[in-house]
Amino acid sequence: MSEDKVINLGAKRDKKTEKTEREHNNDELVYCSFCHRPNTQVLKMVQGPGVNICSECAMIAVQYLILNDRMPSAEAQQILDAFWGKAR
């Protein structure tokens, strides 16, 4: 997994544009759409089209789904492993 603090899940772009955006995102403050903390105060920030979620809010959401039996535990573990970059 990339060491970038802000991960953009937007549309696919060419390599030159992607590199420039990565460099720009590392300098720019990006705020979580849920808790409003900036990327400088969280482990990771995932950027989507018009929305951002920090690693902490993502973990709370996954835990909520597990506790409310909305997601099978094996599937939740795969998501957690993928999010934290652990290979299975």
Image: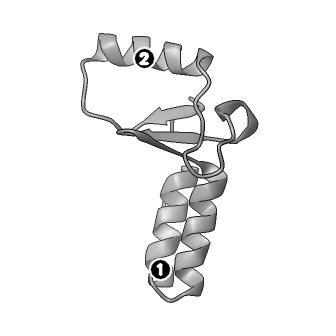
The residue under the point 61% across, 74% down is 63
Instruction: Say if 62 sits above or below 3 in the image.
Output: below
Residue at 47 percent across and 67 percent down: it is 78
Compare residues 11 and 51 and report the one nearer the observer. 51
Q: Looking at the picture, how far across and down is residue 43, in whole percent?
A: 69, 42
Q: Percent position (x, y) of residue 42? A: 71, 41
Residue 74: give its label. 1
- Residue under label 2, please give it: 21
Residue that protrudes farthest toward the right in the picture? 41
List x then y, in percent, for residue 31: 60, 36
Numbered disc total = 2
- Secondary structure beneath label 1: helix
Residue 86 appears in view: no
Residue 87 to residue 42: above or below: below
Nearest to the observer: residue 51 or residue 71: 51
Q: Amino acid at mark 2?
A: Glu
Q: Please report the residue visible at 45 percent of the width from the left and 84 percent of the height from the top.
A: 70
Q: Position of residue 40 (x, y in %)?
A: 71, 30
- Nearer-N-terminus badge (1/2): 2
Task: Determine whether 68 is above or below 12 in the image.
Answer: below
